[in-house]
Amino acid sequence: MEPHTRKLLTMVTEAVLETTIVRDIERLGAHGYTITDARGKGSRGVRNAGWETSANIRIEVVCDAETAEAIAAHVKKHYYDDYAMILHVSDVEVLRPEKF
Amino acid sequence: MIDPIILFFLLGLFAGLSRSELRLPAAIYEFVSILLLLSIGLKGGIELARQPFGNLLPQMLAVVTMGFLLPLVAFPVLRYAGRFKRADAASISAHYGSVSVGTYAVAAAYFATRQIAFEEHLPLLLVLLEVPAIVVGIVLARGLSRQTRWGTIAHEVFLGKSIVLLIGGLLIGWAAGPDGITSIEPLFFDLFKGILALFLLEMGMITATQVGSLRQHGPFLLVFGVAMPLFSAVVGTGLGLALGLSVAGTAMLATMAASASYIAVPAAMRISVPEANPTLSLAASLGITFPFNVLVGIPIYHALAERAHMLL
């Protein structure tokens, strides 16, 4: 069984953005995503998920390189200035490439 | 006599400030606030079933007008005396024009403890007061630009948790009527103060997290966070008198006017005015105004309403 390389795009951002970002991701061609609740600390202070406005989410998307690039460019343009957000992309190997 | 629920708030504050291990699980906080919102909605709904809707229209219009005007008073103060950026001033104004259901609940418990009755339909006015300030805040920040996505914002505002649950509770209470509700009374009405105590414990801890940002943003917010609710309370008292509310009803309306939102408005502002710094408005509304209202504001508004009624 040969592995196929795809991109894993991970975003940690404010929970309030969930609906908007999910809509953007789907429109930009991702076939799926995974969201988990997250907490931590960064340049915008401790976000401890104690209640709604300080809650963070982590969004993970496995997709091809073009989609990952498109999503990264889109969120950078629309959300980086005003929202707490980090994004990183890494290579992953998947077994069923048709899913991503 | 100090109300035990206030002691719960102080306990939360102490736990937060001393960095205790204590943490209410997020799901519990969510559940507790859902119960509070539904209880308040149901109470109001039962009353709506008793009286014709038409009688309430003047009060509804008056409260909506107040919701539009309060942020318009706050904005120039913040912009010119406080030297805040336009977006920040607009966002803070929206918080102060809107209403805090938690503060309302504490005031309702305050009068229940003293066995003083107030108009039961006030939750209807509470719902109405949430919305106008959000619209004013967005327009103050943006102007009437075509780019504002009113559809998304309307969805955020009207389908946000607090409005859905308050209106849902109102409708269920109204449809079921006083007799129909008896079966669910033990959970929603009998346990109300216990639930409120848990809610305030968590609010104490949340308030404590704001202390750091208060230190950063200095004395102006501190003064504003106390002066603005006092001013709004005077407006609310006047309106209560004009509408012919009882003493406790007037004090409740003053409390609503004085309270600053920390759930519905922050979420709406984050989506529609993202360049506004949420730390500023939350430090003011949660770090100063909420504890001020809960600890000393409500008795002051009660005394104010009594004086005002005596003068008439």
Image (cartoon, coloured by chain):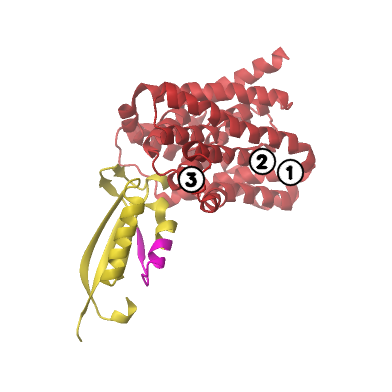
Chain colours: A yellow, B red
The disc at residue B48 is 1
Chain for disc number 2: B
Which residue position holds label 3? B268
Circle 3: residue type = Ala
Above/below status of B163 relative to A65: above
Circle 2: residue type = Leu
Q: Is residue A55 left or right of residue B307?
A: left
Please provide percent x and percent y for residue A28. 37, 66
Residue drawn at x 21%, y 71% is A92
Residue segment shown in magenta: A23-36
Work out how far the residue at label 3 is from the one at label 2, CA to CA, in angstroms: 21 Å
The answer to which of A62 and B9 lies nearer the viewer is A62
Which residue position holds label 2? B124
Mark 1 or mark 3, earlier in chain: 1
Residue drawn at x 66%, y 22% is B238
Residue B295 appears in view: no
Q: Are marks 1 and 2 in contact (CB under 8 Å)?
A: yes
